[in-house]
Amino acid sequence: MLLRFTKMHGLGNDFMVLDLVSQHAHVLPRHVKTWGDRHTGVGFDQLLIVEPPGSPDVDFRYRIFNSDGSEVEQCGNGARCFARFVLDKRLTSKKVIRVETKGGVIELSVANDGQVSVDMGAPRLAPEQVPFVADVEALSYSIEVDGQSVELAAVSMGNPHGVLRVDNVDSAPVRTLGPQLEVHPRFPAKANIGFLQVVDPHHARLRVWERGVGETQACGTGACAAAVAGIRQGWLQSPVQIDLPGGRLSIEWAGPGQPVMMTGPAVRVYEGQVRL
C-alpha cells in the first residue's frame, strides 16, 4: 500500500505530514521509526497526522509522533505546517481552523502572506499539570544534576518544558545538560528543555533539546514556554521575538490565564509516497 505524504518545515523543524482523511491506514510506531531515519527513510523531527475530527466543534484531529516512534501531546511548529497543509490539500477552505490535539484544542489562523498564527491556549503552570514534581508552584525550581544545582522554570504548553536562562546560547551545554534534564525524575513524563538567552526585554535567543528527538532547529512550544517563563520572571515583555537556530518566531502573552499566541512561517518542501 502506497501512502502520499508531504515534507514540510517550520524554521527548519521538519515534518512528514500524512493525510488520513482522504487516505486510510493504521500507522504504527515501527513505521514512524523507519520513515524518520535520516539515512534510510524520509527523515524528520516529527510525523504529523491529519485525521477526521472526534467532535463536532473542531475541524480536524492532529496527532504528532517523534522520530523515535513516541506519540506526543503538542508541537507548535507542526501546528503551523498542519494549517498550511490542510489548506493546500483543500481539506478545508477556512482561514481559522480549530484542531483537536492530545494536549487540548488549539486554533490556527492563516494570513494572506503565508504566516500562520496559533492560539496555543493558556500555559499550565501548576506542577501537577506540567507534570513536574514540586510541593508548591514557583517561578523557578532548583534541580540537582550530576552534583550541580540547575535553576529552571517548569511550564506546560500542552507538553512539558523546562526553561533555564543562560548567558549565551552558543556556548550553552544543550547536548550534555539537555538529555540529562529531559529524563530527570522530577519530570515524570520527560520534558523538552529550553536554553534561553535574554537579549533585551522584547528579544531573546533560544535553543531547545526536544524530548524523544534531540536538539532541533526550532521548537514552537519551546518558544512559547520560554516567553512565558521570561515574562513571569520579569526578564521579558510581550511581544517577544525569539530567535532559534532555524529562524524567528513572534510570541505574545498577556499573563496568567491568557492564551499564548505564536506567529511564524510554514514551508512545503516536496511531495512523495511511502510503502506501508
Image (spheres, helix red, strand yellow):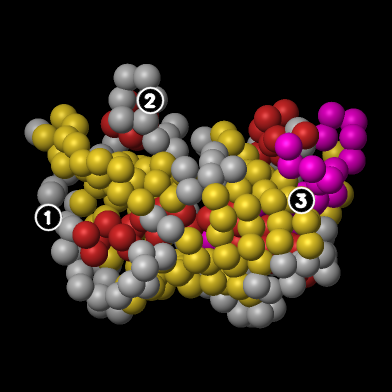
Boundaries of the magenta span: 145-170
Element on which disc 3 rests: strand
Q: Are marks 3 and 2 in contact (CB under 8 Å)?
A: no
Residue 171 percent coordinates (x, y): 77, 34
Which label's residue is closer to the chain start, 1 or 3? Answer: 1
The answer to whether any part of residue 246 appears in the image is yes
Residue at 15% across / 39% down in the picture?
A: 3
- Answer whether residue 147 is magenta in the image: yes
Quote the CA–CA distance across marks 1 and 3. 44 Å
Tell me: 14 left or right of 236: left
Element on which disc 1 rests: loop
Quadrant occupied by the C terminus: top left
- Give the amino acid at mark 1: Ser
Quote the CA–CA distance across marks 3 and 2. 31 Å
Which label's residue is closer to the chain start, 3 or 2? Answer: 2
Quadrant occupied by the N terminus: top left
Residue 216 percent coordinates (x, y): 54, 39
Of the numbered discs in the image, which one, if any, rests on residue 197? 3
Say few, some or many: other residues with alpha carbon within 10 Å of mark 2 (under 14 / 14 to 19 / 20 or more): some
- Give the amino acid at mark 3: Gln
- Answer whether residue 8 is magenta in the image: no
Q: Residue furthest left?
A: 1
Residue at 39% across / 25% down in the picture?
A: 38
Provide the residue designation for mark 2: 37
